[in-house]
Image (spheres, grey):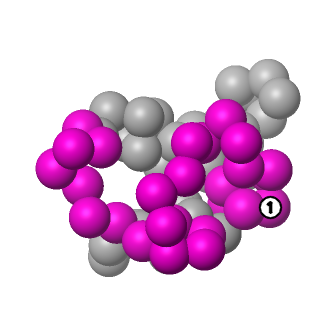
Amino acid sequence: MPPARLRKAGLLELILQLADRDPATTDAPTAEGDAHDLDALDGESLLRLAAETTSD
């Protein structure tokens, strides 16, 4: 997916923040509650994971 499309949807910054996190120190929940390889998740699961781990 082109970065411009992610930016337009308001997801680019969120994805970049997730990419910058250190997985060894992050206890964020995943789509199924286990540690996942982000490459193995489909788009819907990635968006769900991102929505669950955002803090307002």
Would you say residue 51 is visible in this rendering? no
16 or 22, nearer to the observer: 22
- Stretch of the chain drawn in magenta: 22-47
Magenta segment: does it hold 29? yes
Q: Is residue 23 above or below residue 51?
A: above
Q: Secondary structure at mark 1?
A: helix
Residue named by callout 1: 44
Would you say residue 11 is visible in this rendering? yes
Q: Is residue 24 above or below residue 32?
A: above
Q: Residue furthest left?
A: 25
Q: Name which residue lies at 48% across and 48% down.
A: 14
23 or 13, nearer to the observer: 23
Q: Name which residue lies at 32% across and 76% down.
A: 56
Quadrant in the picture for the N terminus? top right
Q: Residue 52: horizontal and vertical position, in percent?
A: 50, 75
Q: Is residue 42 above or below residue 3?
A: below
Q: Residue furthest front?
A: 34
Q: Residue 40: horizontal and vertical position, in percent?
A: 71, 42
Q: Name which residue lies at 49% across and 67% down.
A: 34
Q: Residue 46: horizontal and vertical position, in percent?
A: 67, 55
